[in-house]
Amino acid sequence: MIQIKTVAHFNNPENRFIVITDTTGQMIHKVPLCRTVTQEKFEEKVILNQCKNGKYFDVNSYDEAKRQWGRIKTCDYCFN
Ligand SMILES: [Zn+2]
């Protein structure tokens, strides 16, 4: 699991999943990313707001995310 801190990393993740955390919890998405995960939102949360309300992580598996966060929501677009 690697925290994503740059736009370059966001656009070219190393692993198969992205987890986005925020004040209400965390959600896992598959790579390639669905339309709900945009560079614009990444830049707002990570660059402009300096991760104050949440972070992005490059994650190898759903199980890894489960171990890290316990409760995790799956994206409706990625996992249906
Ligand atoms: Zn998704």
Image (tube, rainbow, N blue to C red):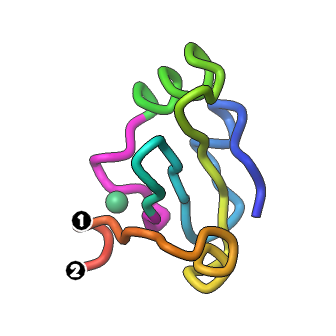
33 in magenta: yes
Ligand 1 within 8 A of label 1's CB? yes
Residue 8 position in % (x across, y down): 67, 35
Residue displayed at 76% across by 64% down: 1
- The vertical placement of 32 against 63, above or below, is above
Residue displayed at 65% across by 21% down: 50
Q: Quadrant of ligand 1?
A: bottom left
- The vertical placement of 80 against 17, above or below, is below
In the displayed structure image, the side of residue 5 where residue 11 appears, left or right: left
Q: Which stretch appears magenta?
A: 28-38
Residue furthest out toward the bottom: 63
Residue highlighted by disc 1: 77
Residue displayed at 46% across by 70% down: 72
Question: Mark 1 near mark 2, Cβ–Cβ under 8 Å?
Answer: yes
Residue highlighted by disc 2: 80
Residue 24 position in % (x across, y down): 40, 48
